[in-house]
Image: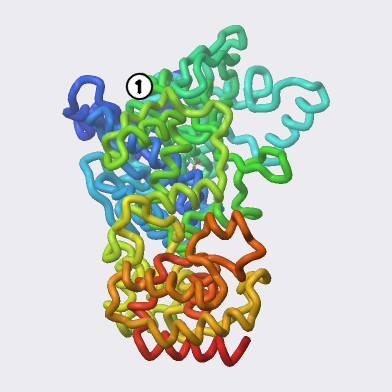
Amino acid sequence: MDFTKLAELLFPDVDKTVEYYEELYKERNLPEGARVTRFAPSPTGYLHIGGLFSGLISKLTADVSGGAFYLRIEDTDKKREVEDGVSGIVKGLRDFGIDITEGVTGFNTEAGDYGPYTQSKRADVYHCVAKQLVLSGLAYPCFCTAEEVQAIRDEQEALGVLPGYYGKYAKCRELSYEEIEEKVKSGIPYVLRLRSPGTGEGKIIFDDMIKGKIEMPENIVDVVLLKTDGIPTYHFAHCCDDHFMRTTHVIRGDEWISSVPTHIQLFKSCGFKVPKYAHIAPIMKLDDGNKRKLSKRKDPEAAVEFYNEQGYPKESVLEYLYTLANSNFEDWRRANKDADLSQFPFNLKKMSVSGALFDLVKMNDVSKNVICVKDADWVLERTLKWAEEYDKDFFQLLSADKAKARAILNIDRENAKPRKDIAKWSDVPAYVAYFYNYEADYSVLPETINKEDAKAVLTEYKKVWNIDDDKDTWFQKMKDLCEPLGFTPNVKEYKANPDKFKGHIGDVSTIIRVAMTSRTNTPDLYEIMKILGVEEVNNRIDNMMATL
Ligand code: GLU
């Protein structure tokens, strides 16, 4: 067969050579050992937390090596595409700390020297490489219809042999130039297939950077490279792109492991260097004691948007994803409490082989730790931003008096051991509710406290408290209430002789706390009363006395 003639017949319009693109997309000028990685989603508009995770892993791998990371949009499968399926992905990445500086940066925008970074805009590149494969006898047109291909599959299934277009099943492999020319000229649609050099004897052995050494039979199937409309398959497109975008490490979900023999064969057939692979296990979840994949359909927390809606700060989400990424992260964090995440020595090789377990309770704990050490302005600013989008009424309430909101959020915040009440901004409305117009509920008053005693405490307390008292005086006044009312200021004394007293200082302060907040556990009551102010404190005392 005259492959030059065939290549011209199939690709009359391709005037560039592979060398042209080798020159256009120069080797990156990076230090020795620098890794080039990418995140390559389809434009579905939806970002799964697993996608964010895999994007983060790819970015970290590049960052710790002084390399480059870029976003490529893989839109060869039109069935999966939605209109502007890109902005949501870019925003999802950016919201959680992955700013895209190379590749697709938004709907119809991009940056970088290796573009276009959207596969549908790279037809010239694929066709040029495809032509080169035809020229070297490694690709051929296949005119089999979908029905014919299905019939082959059915036959193979009945025989119990490997399904696919290969060997003796690959009818179009041996067509002569004349036969091909006739079909092409009469307009019969065709796909372009790889002429797989696999013999069925060979093995593919590769060292996955996460999963370790993997051995699989080599590929023998003549996979489709270009579909009838000239659009490449994912397999072929990613091979051309990862080569010309100078990707050194292909990091992706482990559902692609079974395709690696095909991919390695494709890289080699094109004369491209095979990249290193790292396959990430999916993020798992415990469901009724069973581990299963975090599912887009069943689990709201699978969508990255969930974290925005709930108001998790990006710092918390990132911090939690790091705990899933490397199991030594938490030890590192304990030893480096204030260090920036970028200082963590992330290591691809320390990733979970079987799939990290996602746990929202743990995520909340991590987030509380992140938030509790931030100052009130940081917390207020983010709460307002969240509320403006997701809880307009609360936004109005907080913004009406920002100084008050700040004071509320500042209670106990500057302590050596700050409280951990807030995991996400949607926790804040309930957390601060009693500072605003709220429905008091005194049923939380412990049953051990007699209502008449509570009233007596409130009556006396109203007479003595003063907004200008310093904290010691404030507390002393509560203590002084105890004895005349049959309580004791001394908890030890109470414990030794519980029958002698109506209660102890803790009960007295609980009565006042419940009057102020309808809660038994709150941040510093002294600060709370200062924020409520004279009139409101007195109203609340009166209200509880009238209600009990
Ligand atoms: N477009 C593929 C996906 O969405 C990417 C696979 C890869 O990263 O190579 O799964």
Q: Specify the farthest residue to the right.
A: 158
* Residue drawn where x is 48% and y is 25% of the image: 263
Look at 41% across and 57% down and name the residue there. Answer: 419
In this picture, is 173 found above or below 406?
above
Q: Quadrant of the C terminus?
A: bottom right
Residue 525 in view in this figure: yes
Frontmost residue, 199 versus 365: 365
The extreme top residue here reads 201
Image coloring type: rainbow
Depicted 459 relative to depicted 367: above or below: below
**Which one is nearer the viewer's eye here, 373 or 379?**
373
Query: Does residue 486 appear left or right of residue 150 in this picture?
Result: left
Q: Secondary structure at mark 1?
A: loop
Residue 267 picture location, percent across and down: 41, 23
| Residue 45 visible in image | no
**Residue 187 placed where, x, y %?**
53, 44
Q: Residues within 10 Å of mark 1 (few under 14, many from 20)?
A: some
Residue placed under numbered mark 1 in the picture: 272
Looking at the picture, how far across and down is residue 66, in whole percent? Answer: 22, 30
The kind of residue tagged 1 is Phe
Query: Which residue does the image show at 60% across and 46% down from the upper left?
Result: 294
Residue 499: image quadrant is bottom right
Q: Is residue 495 above or below residue 219?
A: below
Q: At x 38% / y 23%, what residue is drawn? A: 275
